[in-house]
Amino acid sequence: MIGPLTLIGDTATEQLAQDIAMVAAPGWVIRLEGDLGAGKTTFARSFIRTLAKDVSLEVPSPTYTLVQRYDEADPAVLHADLYRLTDPSEMVELGLDDPDDPAIRLVEWPGQAGEGAFSGAITLTFDMRGEAARQATLSGPQDMLDRLSRSLDIRAFLTAANHQSADRQRLLGDASTRRYERLIDTPLIVMDAARQPDGPIVQPDTGALKQDAKPYSQLVHLAESVHAFSAVGTALRQAGFAAPVTHASDLDYGLLLIEDLGGDTILHADGSPDSERYQAAAELLGALHDVDWPEELSVPGGGTHHLHRYDTGVLLTEISLLPDWYVAHRGVEAADFDRAGFFAAWQRALASLEEEPTTLTLRDYHSPNIIWRDQETGLARLGLIDFQDALLGPLAYDVAALVQDARVTIPADLQEQLIKAYIRASDANTDWLRARVALMGAQRNSKILGIFARLNARDGKPGYLKHLPRVENYMRQCLAHPSLAELKPFYDQLLPEVA
């Protein structure tokens, strides 16, 4: 149980609704208990407006309609008032128990639905403690309470940072466990990245290269705390690049309050690539790769962050996601795929990288993580985010990530423009760079194909499958380079025919 929480006035009740809305997941049922006038409808109205991102949205009490649906909210919300329900059998007609509907259910007077209704729900009980004060308690499944407790802790974090009255707004996350929130009326972002428990120990089966058995996140050096974000961001700013300034932090608890660099990306409003902005992003990489990056970065507040090498072992472990997940996704039996030959070919392809210079490799240098700042000039025009997994790796990796954006189709002619823009900015050898972009693009696309297949099969997130045709097409482009001829037969077995 959480509480009792003391709420003084409607503003405190509305803030509690906002805090709960930050972490409420599709399909949740929130039972609203309390006497008439206890604050149930006040809570529901604020909750719905928060998810709809519309403070003026009309949210009438559904006393007579019994159920009101709000598809403008994200996730959608069903607001029910069962006070006038005369018989629990009438519940069938209300659609509140449809297992295929992902809407969040807010249910006032849930007891009218009968014994056992809404099992597995969160129950929020209001108890008036005077004319302007009420108490609220939360009970329900522990995993849901843990999410709610985390959100209340974020409110406490904001209070300690002198933003106790801030209005919070959910932001789209990524494929990781990190969450983001925007504070309304102040240019700040909450980064919620609690340290996650290690996953299962894995022994990478990547051919002759033997690697220690560790959780996957450790094998590929994914950031396990916000210390990495803080250190890399500081280093980027010191080198003249635009990364968010940290205004408050609780590093051990995984909370940062960072500068909001804005909402514009390097895409047009319709989601297509803006060639001018993409070329600026390619030129920025030239400047980034001209910096001599140290292996040890300072963490503000104390300590250091070590930049690991993006070496053959890490690259092969990431590639292993393709035979582990994408092969099955394509309906190919594991026994019919020459895994040993596949990794032997990849080891030969990657061997030359060991002798080449390295640079700071951001690893996800693509449209969602590059902010366009039209009012700025020079390097400051582009804001960088989502760089906590940065390593010291191949110069061409981030070039490949940019020109073969997994979420946006980059036409071949624009890809060519971007490669030329990078060459002008970095003075890289043209033939060498094209070969390396093909190699790094093939590695990255292999990883992405595996990740998107895994998100669907293991994590129940099929939405990423819509990007597979694009990534598969990028893979075909990479494999057309003569330097990857040995790898091409393995992918010909997997890639679907072009329609």
Image (spheres, rainbow, N blue to C red):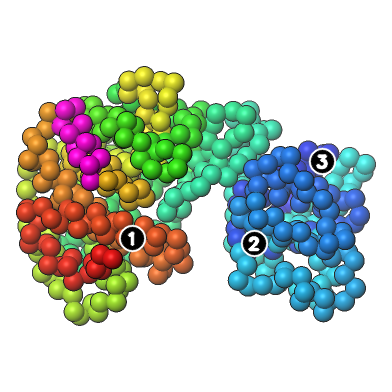
Secondary structure at numbered mark 1: helix
* In-image side of 303 versus 314 (left or right): right
Left or right, 216 with respect to 491, comes to right
Report the amino acid beneath label 1.
Answer: Leu
Quarter of the image with the N terminus is bottom right
Q: CB atoms at circles 2 and 1 under 8 Å apart? A: no
The answer to whether one can see residue 178 in this image is: yes
Q: Give the range drawn in magenta.
A: 412-425
Numbered tag placed on residue 103 in the rendering: 2
- The 10 Å Cα crowd at callout 3, few under 14, some 14 to 19, many 20 or more, is some
Main secondary-structure element of the magenta-colored stretch: helix
Within 10 Å of the Cα at label 2, are there few (<14), some (14-19), or many (20+) other Cα atoms?
A: many
Q: Which mark is residue 269?
A: none
Q: Quadrant of residue 459?
A: bottom left
Q: What residue type is labelled 2?
A: Ala
The residue where tag 1 is placed is: 468
The residue shown at (88%, 61%) is: 64
The local secondary structure at tag 2 comes to loop
Q: In which quarter of the image is residue 401?
A: top left
For residue 10, the mark is 3
- Percent x, y for residue 229? 39, 38
The alpha-carbon separation of the residues under discs 2 and 3 comes to 25 Å
Magenta highlight on residue 235: no
